[in-house]
Amino acid sequence: MNYKGSCHCGKIQFTIEGELNKALDCNCSHCSRKGFLLWFVEKAKFNMSTPEDELTLYKFNRHLIEHRFCPVCGCQAFGFGKDPATGADMVAVNIRCLEDIDLSSIEIKQIDGKSF
């Protein structure tokens, strides 16, 4: 299935190919403050319509994830990182930024990111 997403103002736009059936709700200081529901997908299945250099970058803690957000509206729709088990390039997509998603149909798994 293909999904389309964007930031709040629409400057940042992207598409993803994959099956969205569950997302992670992390309690770390970053995710909990922003209300993220994260879906991790291979970077090869993620396509940005907006050039990457038009996004703002934020790193914190161990600097392992490149949190990307819109410099206009401040919305963070995704971040780039690596799968800790395989080293593969991954994208952590905030499913709240995807179009036409029924959140009640998605299994939400709680993650204790506060303890990492």
Image (tube, rainbow, N blue to C red):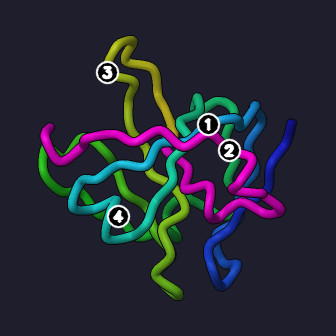
Secondary structure type for disc 3: loop
Dots 1, 3 in contact, CB < 8 A: no
Q: Is residue 72 above or below residue 49?
A: below
Question: Mark 2 vs mark 1: which is more N-terminal?
Answer: 1
Residue placed under numbered mark 1 in the picture: 22
The disc placed on residue 84 is: 3
Residue at horizontal 69 percent and vertical 56 percent from the top: 103
In the visual, does 61 lie left or right of 17?
left
Amino acid under disc 3: Pro
Q: In this rendering, which labeled residue sits more in front, label 2 or label 4? A: 2
Magenta segment: does it hold 111? yes
Residue 102, given in percent of the width and then of the height, sits at 77, 57
Q: What label sits on residue 69 in the rendered view?
A: none
How many other residues sit within 10 Å of disc 3, few (<14), some (14-19) or many (≥20)? few
- Look at the image and give the residue range highlighted in magenta: 92-116
Mark nearer the N terminus (2 vs 4)? 4
Q: Which residue is mark 2?
A: 106
